[in-house]
Image (spheres, rainbow, N blue to C red):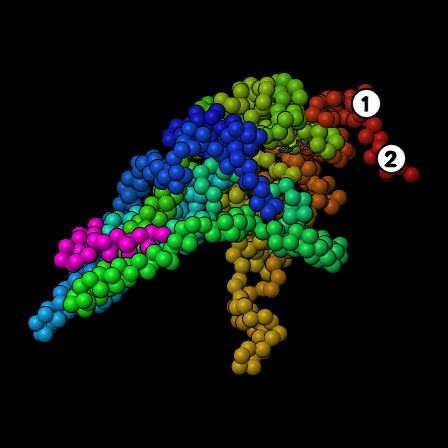
């Protein structure tokens, strides 16, 4: 849970407050532990402020946070102003909001006038004024506000969607994998229909309107109370009731302050895990093929029975517990307080019986307007919480633009002479050790080797020995914990990352397919030439993918995994509608050319697409790294692939990681035989066989399978 966040702040731009919310759950003096159902809640204590009421600290904290976010809000409004036509829309939206916020005070004033009419009518028995109806004006303003809302929201959302996309796309592997960065990104990202920025604009304006509403109502209320006997007393009593009601009905969604919650309840974890297995499409094959449904169903039911009512997520558990503890003094006081103004009124009526009609009207007006006023006041106080949160999200949004990447960029162009790439790239590992972030075990220990320009190197070894990790370090997804990697005799850390990535092409063992068309999947192998159809087709040919792609209905435009699913009504297939028509989706699907199945390819076909992506970047690449490139290929495809690759020898440096000995290792200039994080043997095939060590043993083991 504790993160070494302080080290990160080297990048430019505002420093991200990584340490906020971090505390040590084991430290009892600073942490309060509460058991809530299956959850353990840990809250940070604030020892120096124990004597201050908690809600007050909270408000102070809220205002402090708002102050810190203010520069970002200014930046936000400036940026919105730079979007086409947004200043006008924003100004219009503000004006309409403010005009609307004056209405309650105007209405209140008219109510006062009405009361005066009643008073005059009682005294003089004549009515000479008529109240004005403001509802039409309110509707008109509301309509205007809605008209501005849409174009303004759309423009802001589009603008910030592009910025957030870039902020995410530029992050490197260790930074993106960091849970704190993930949380930061999530907080700065609202749903697709609205944006954090829009929410903040709306809440800022609504806070301004509420303030205007409050001040104007307050002034009118003061003016009215002056004229009424017992007005201030009745107003205070009625305000008191609203205050208590508000206090008792307040809902707390989450704990205040700095907190963290975890569950170690095995039964609960298992039940959530089982739920995932059933919900997530990726487990469906195993679930069906393994006949797991009945077992999972029975286990899930048994787990829920054993867990009882405590098997809920944290939010629900917290709220249930919180509501159960709410039966306190204030809730008992609330009801008598409501009756208090009436009691006072009755006593006064007994004292001054001649004034009854007037006091009745006063009572009504005063209690109603006071409760209106107090509601607005409490709304505003509530809003400060939500606006602080919104403004904090704006800050997080802008901070995502400057989250420093763990792998820092170099400044030296690579290679200095682009022609030299035609002979490949030399690579040297000098005493390299490496451990993954957050891990405490070295997965590479003091590794040293050198591969010359244009050589073919194969790294072999058991599972988990560190082969893929070597390729990841060459691609600079991570930096070594110790030691140095040299490319063409230059420290890899000093090279410009963009140049390095342009000069290398890597196919990872756990390659993925993007939820894009096959064409885009291949094209992304060389973003600079992604529009070049000829190149894409040539890459597909080199990857051995052309034949099966052309047999697909939509060819290169086929989506392997459509990122946007078709939508259907909720009426179940095979049932009948209210009017007796049977629900059948076949014809609708046919009309819209919607398929009921997603396109599925074999493992080998998918690997060929991934290989094609690697071949996309042909010119200008001096280093090819392949992690188990033929694991899913049939023997002919594997043979063809290696034939093609062998032809590249001398013009590109190639590094393979493989379990399979034979096809490649026999032709390799250099074989690195690894076991348990270290290189045990190094040489050509013949040399290693002669040596009779681990490599030779495994070679014999594999060869025996083919001997009679
Ligand atoms: N992202 C990661 N975080 C932490 N540990 C990791 C990570 N990736 C790999 N490891 C660990 O590093 C060690 C080496 O993994 P690596 O993938 O380099 O092995 P490999 O030799 O390529 O294995 P295989 O033959 O199974 O592909 C393993 O013990 C693995 O558990």
Q: Earlier in the sequence, mark 1 or mark 2?
A: 1
Give how far across and how far down residue 347 sits, in percent: 25, 61
**Would you say residue 180 sits in the magenta stretch?**
no
**Residue placed at 63% from the left, 22% from the top?**
433
Q: Which residue is mark 1?
A: 693
- Compared across the picture, whether 610 is left or right of 21 comes to right
Q: Nearer the viewer, residue 172 or 309?
A: 309
Look at the image and give the residue range highlighted in magenta.
Answer: 215-244
**Count of all numbered marks drawn on residues in the image:** 2
- The image quadrant where one finds ligand 1 is top right
Closest to the camera, between mark 1 and mark 2, is 1
Q: Nearer the viewer, residue 540 or 564?
A: 564
Q: Which residue is mark 2?
A: 704
Q: Kindly tell me whether residue 213 is visible in this rendering.
A: no
**Residue placed at 62% from the left, 74% from the top?**
574
**Would you say residue 219 sits in the magenta stretch?**
yes
Give how far across and how far down residue 523 sits, in percent: 53, 45
Quadrant (top left, top right, bottom left, bottom right) of the N terminus:
top right
- Compared across the picture, whether 530 is left or right of 398 comes to right
Magenta stretch: helix, strand or loop mostly:
helix
- Compared across the picture, whether 369 is left or right of 439 comes to left
Give how far across and how far down residue 512 sits, in percent: 60, 44
Q: Nearer the viewer, residue 204 or 626?
A: 204
Q: Kindly tell me whether residue 55 is visible in this rendering.
A: yes
Give how far across and how far down residue 629 sits, in percent: 67, 39
């Amino acid at each position: 849970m504790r993160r070494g966040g302080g080290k990160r702040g080297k990048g430019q731009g505002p420093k991200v407050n990584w340490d906020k919310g971090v505390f040590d759950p084991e430290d009892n003096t600073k942490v309060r532990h509460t058991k809530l159902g299956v959850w353990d809640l840990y809250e940070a204590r604030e020892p120096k402020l124990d004597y201050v009421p908690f809600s007050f600290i909270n408000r102070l904290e809220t205002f402090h946070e708002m102050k810190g976010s203010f520069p970002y809000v200014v930046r936000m409004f400036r940026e919105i102003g730079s979007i086409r036509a947004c200043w006008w829309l924003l100004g219009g939206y503000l004006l309409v909001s403010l005009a609307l916020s004056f209405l309650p005070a105007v209405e209140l004033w008219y109510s006062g006038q009405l009361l005066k009419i009643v008073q005059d009518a009682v005294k003089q028995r004549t009515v000479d004024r008529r109240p004005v109806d403001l509802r039409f004006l309110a509707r008109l303003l509301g309509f205007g506000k809605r008209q501005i809302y849409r174009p303004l929201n759309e423009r802001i959302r589009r603008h910030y969607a592009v910025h957030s996309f870039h902020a995410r796309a530029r992050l490197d592997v260790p930074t993106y994998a960091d849970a704190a960065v993930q949380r930061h990104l999530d907080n700065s990202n609202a749903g697709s229909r609205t944006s954090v920025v829009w929410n903040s604009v709306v809440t800022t304006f609504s806070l301004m309107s509420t303030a205007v509403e409050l001040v104007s109502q307050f002034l009118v209320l003061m003016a009215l109370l002056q004229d009424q006997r017992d007005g201030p007393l009745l107003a205070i009593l009625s305000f008191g009731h609203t205050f208590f009601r508000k206090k008792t009905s307040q809902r707390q969604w989450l704990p205040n302050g700095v907190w963290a919650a975890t569950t170690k309840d095995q039964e609960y974890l298992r039940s959530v895990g089982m739920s995932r297995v059933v919900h997530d499409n990726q487990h469906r094959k195993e679930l069906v093929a393994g006949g797991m449904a009945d077992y999972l169903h029975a286990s899930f039911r048994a787990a829920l029975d054993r867990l009882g009512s405590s098997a809920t997520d944290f939010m629900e558990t917290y709220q249930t517990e919180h509501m159960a503890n709410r039966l306190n003094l204030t809730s008992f006081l609330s009801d008598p307080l409501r009756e208090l103004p009436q009691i006072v009124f009755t006593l006064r009526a007994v004292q001054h019986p001649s004034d009854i009609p007037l006091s009745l009207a006063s009572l009504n007006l005063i209690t109603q307007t006071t409760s209106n006023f107090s509601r607005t006041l409490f709304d505003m106080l509530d809003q400060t919480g939500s606006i602080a949160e919104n403004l904090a999200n704006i800050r997080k949004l802008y901070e995502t633009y400057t989250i420093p990447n763990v792998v820092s960029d170099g400044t030296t162009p690579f290679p200095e002479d682009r022609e030299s790439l035609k002979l490949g790239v030399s690579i040297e590992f000098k005493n390299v050790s490496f451990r993954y972030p957050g891990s405490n075990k070295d997965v590479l220990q003091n590794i040293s080797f050198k591969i010359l320009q244009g050589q073919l190197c194969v790294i072999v070894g058991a599972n988990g020995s560190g082969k893929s990790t070597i390729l990841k370090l060459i691609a600079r997804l991570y930096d070594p914990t110790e030691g140095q990697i040299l490319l063409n005799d230059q420290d890899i850390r000093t090279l410009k990352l963009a140049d390095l990535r342009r000069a290398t092409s890597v196919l990872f063992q756990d390659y993925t397919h993007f939820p894009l068309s096959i064409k885009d999947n291949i094209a992304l192998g060389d973003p600079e030439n992604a529009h070049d159809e000829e190149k894409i087709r040539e890459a597909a040919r080199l990857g051995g993918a052309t034949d099966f792609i052309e047999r697909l209905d939509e060819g290169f435009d086929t989506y392997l995994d459509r990122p946007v699913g078709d939508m259907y009504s909720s009426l179940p297939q095979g049932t009948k509608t209210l009017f007796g028509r049977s629900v059948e989706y076949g014809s609708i699907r046919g009309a819209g050319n919607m398929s009921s199945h997603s396109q599925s390819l074999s493992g080998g076909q998918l690997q060929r697409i991934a290989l094609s992506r690697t071949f996309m970047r042909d010119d200008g690449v001096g280093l090819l790294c392949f992690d188990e490139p033929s694991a899913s290929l049939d023997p002919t495809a594997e043979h063809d692939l290696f034939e093609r690759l062998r032809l590249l020898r001398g013009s590109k440096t190639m590094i393979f990681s493989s379990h399979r000995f034979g096809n490649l290792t026999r032709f390799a200039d250099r074989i690195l035989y690894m076991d348990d994080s270290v290189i045990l043997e190094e040489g050509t095939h013949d040399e290693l066989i002669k040596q009779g060590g681990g490599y030779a043993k495994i070679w014999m083991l594999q060869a025996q399978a083919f001997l009679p």
